[in-house]
Image (cartoon, grey):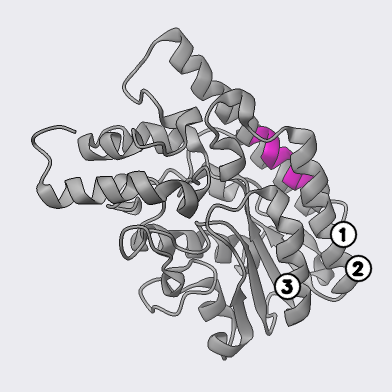
């Protein structure tokens, strides 16, 4: 650890070393980046082909599925979920969550069923929990942990990612035939690296093992490092293709057209405790992005 770090930060780093693996699994990114134009265009084209009348922009209840992004991990303090700051179901006015914008009684009509550290293989079980709540709207944001592995060869294979996502959708379609599903794209982890590496303390935190497939050796511009990062980015784009394709199979499912992946977030939208997850400001931005894509005037679901 660099001598310039304060004792308080040092203690925080030690806490991260001992707790990070169980809290985060492999970790997940906060916000989104450049590129993805082809995937985004394809998603918007899929949405345009669907009948507009099917999509309800005023559902009366909502269940949110996903990982630590949806749990607002590290948005209010170190190594803690902050669900009241969640983009999907948070109660804080400063975030103005999707549930807060949609529902007249968000506290009793929305449920955050996400779990920090979750991967796509956890989504089918989350879908079953959603069935118990009988929501009219389900949101899904899942996949960053599948790409955030110890190495690129340990990322979730695309075929497995598809299998588990498809299984979750089938459960929702079968058990909640009148509910609709909105799927957010996986964030661009390359953008996370590019923004976060500019912060010296953030780079030190990353060395503790956050998303090593993308974030290890953050300052290295060697051929191997660049190729590794590109491999991760391409896997995320492949995951987003799966989300688009599988969602398009269901009449009541909508994909965000690459909105989350394409968003060019800034440092202030990253958690000051890990330079990795969304800060409270990042959660607010994500809430706005998803709400606009799903329910706003130009919604892909219309």
Place residue 292 in its image quadrant: bottom right
243 inside magenta stretch: yes
Q: Residue furthest front?
A: 18
Q: Which residue is mark 2?
A: 174
Q: Residue at x 44, y 36 (%)?
A: 191
Alpha carbon of mark 3 to alpha carbon of mark 2: how far?
Answer: 12 Å
Labels 1 and 2 touching (C-beta < 8 A): yes
Q: Is residue 77 left or right of residue 39?
A: left
* Residue 251 can be seen, yes or no: no
Labels 3 and 2 touching (C-beta < 8 A): no
Labels 3 and 1 touching (C-beta < 8 A): no
Place residue 193 in its image quadrant: top left
Q: On screen, 284 above or below 233?
A: below
85 or 211: nearer the viewer? 211
Q: Could you tell me which secondary element the residue under label 2 belongs to?
A: helix
Position in image of residue 96 (x %, y %): 44, 74
Q: Which residue is mark 1?
A: 170
User: Magenta-highlighted stretch: main secondary structure?
Assistant: helix
Position in image of residue 203 (x %, y %): 29, 34
Q: How many marks?
A: 3
Write down the region rendered in magenta.
237-245
Mark 3 packing: few (<14 Cα in 10 Å), some, or many (20+)? many
235 or 297: nearer the viewer? 235
Q: Residue at x 33, y 53 (%)?
A: 271
Q: Residue at x 91, y 68 (%)?
A: 174
Alpha carbon of mark 1 to alpha carbon of mark 2: how far?
Answer: 6 Å
Position in image of residue 142 (x %, y %): 63, 52
Q: Which residue is mark 3?
A: 130
Position in image of residue 3 (x %, y %): 9, 34
Q: On screen, 206 above or below 218?
A: below
């Amino acid at each position: 650890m660099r001598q310039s770090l304060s004792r308080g930060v040092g203690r925080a780093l030690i806490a991260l070393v001992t707790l990070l693996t169980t809290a985060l699994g492999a970790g997940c990114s906060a916000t989104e980046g450049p590129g993805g134009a082809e995937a985004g265009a394809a998603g918007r084209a899929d949405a345009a082909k669907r009948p507009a009348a099917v999509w309800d922009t005023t559902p009366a209840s909502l269940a949110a599925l996903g990982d630590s992004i949806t749990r607002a991990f590290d948005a209010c303090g170190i190594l803690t979920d902050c669900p009241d700051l969640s983009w999907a179901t948070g109660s804080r006015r400063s975030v103005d969550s999707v549930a807060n914008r949609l529902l007249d009684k968000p506290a009793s009509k929305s449920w955050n069923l996400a779990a920090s550290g979750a991967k796509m293989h956890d989504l089918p079980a989350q879908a079953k929990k959603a069935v118990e709540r009988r929501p009219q709207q389900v949101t899904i944001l899942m996949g960053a942990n599948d790409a955030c592995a110890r190495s690129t060869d340990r990322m979730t294979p695309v075929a497995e990612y598809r299998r588990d996502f498809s299984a979750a959708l089938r459960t929702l379609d079968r058990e909640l035939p009148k509910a609709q599903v909105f799927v957010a794209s996986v964030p661009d982890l390359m953008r996370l690296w590019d923004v976060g590496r500019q912060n010296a303390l953030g780079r030190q935190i990353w060395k503790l093992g956050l998303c090593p497939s993308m974030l290890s050796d953050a300052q290295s511009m060697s051929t191997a490092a660049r190729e590794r990062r590109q491999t991760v980015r391409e896997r995320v784009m492949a995951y987003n293709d799966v989300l688009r394709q599988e969602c398009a199979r269901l009449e009541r499912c909508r994909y965000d057209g690459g909105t989350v992946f394409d968003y060019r977030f800034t440092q202030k939208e990253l958690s000051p405790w890990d330079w990795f997850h969304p800060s409270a400001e990042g959660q607010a931005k994500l809430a706005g992005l998803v709400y606009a894509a799903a329910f706003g005037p130009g919604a892909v679901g219309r």
